[in-house]
Image: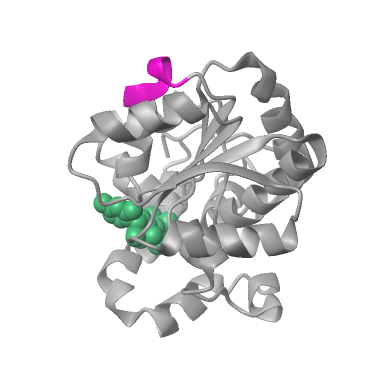
Amino acid sequence: MGVRFDNVTMEEALARAIALLPEKRGAYVVTPNSEIVYEAMADESLRDLLNAADLVLPDGAGVVLGSKILKTPLKEKVAGVDFADRLLGHLAETGGSVYLLGGKPGIAELAGQKMREKHPDLTICGMADGYFRDEGPVVEAIQQDAPDVLFVCLGAPKQERFMARHQKELPVGLMAGLGGSLDSFAGTVKRAPKWMIRLNLEWFYRLLKEPWRFKRMLRLPKFLWAVVCRRMRGA
Ligand code: UDP
């Protein structure tokens, strides 16, 4: 549907991310779900930002299902928040650092606290909320702290635009656009129970918990319908 996903398992995604860290060239990873892919189908600039990423991970059952319908099956869903947690584990083991950017004021601090409980050796070298007017001071702070990994949790497409815009001036190992992941780490937004995740029903749990997302989530069936139409056309 115009977005070139990397066909990787979680382990492979992690290995690729780790390999990018020493380069310190502001590589970035995006984690689109089907809502974002649907948006990108109508927005060439967003599509270009996604395809320019060093790693494009399928964050959602809808994307994996779509890939199967199109006969270009992706190996598995690689949820951004799980990928982020695995990356934190690696940083803690190797003495690497992370900077947390995004979420409402106080969320990054809370998320950082929870991250440290799980990974006591983790270095969190800085954090800032995602409701800034001027990007300049934020960029300067990140430059000063020079983290190995920068979590950019501003929601799509704001985070993708931020990463692409500042890529050249941010000499970090890897930036990761992770949507609402800091809310999830902080525990202010709960993830679905494991059995629901296993049954690919995480989207349904989210709809129950955050019903105001209904309109936005209608993009999921619209995306799948567009996939089926593409398949029927044999494209
Ligand atoms: N957010 C932010 N700055 C903004 C808009 C949003 O930091 O200007 C944060 C918001 O607080 C939330 C995240 O970005 O933590 C977006 O979450 P959502 O679940 O909507 O993300 P997505 O579905 O795109 O992954």
Tell me what residue is drawn at x 50 percent, y 18 percent.
171
Q: Residue placed farthest to the right in the image?
A: 93
| Front position in the image: 104 or 47 | 104
Asked whether residue 223 appears in the rendered view, the answer is no
The one of 216 and 66 positioned closer to us in this rendering:
216
Q: Can you tell which quarter of the image residue 14 is in? A: top right
What is the magenta range?
A: 165-170
Where's ligand 1: which quadrant? bottom left
Q: What residue is rendered at 59% in x and 56% in y?
A: 81
Q: Is residue 22 visible?
A: yes
Residue 100, position as x, y percentages in the image? 49, 46
* Residue 160, quarter of picture: top left
Taking depth in this image into account, of 43 and 20 the one nearest to the observer is 20
Say whether residue 179 is magenta: no
Identify the residue shown where x is 44% and y is 21%. Answer: 170
**Is 167 contained in the magenta span?**
yes
54 horizontally vs 162: left or right: right
Instruction: Using residue 207 as the reference point, say whether residue 195 is left or right of it.
Output: right
Q: Main secondary structure of the magenta part?
A: helix
Residue at the spot x=35%, y=48% of the render?
Answer: 156
> Which residue sits furthest bottom?
208
The spot of residue 54 in percent (x, y) is 55, 25
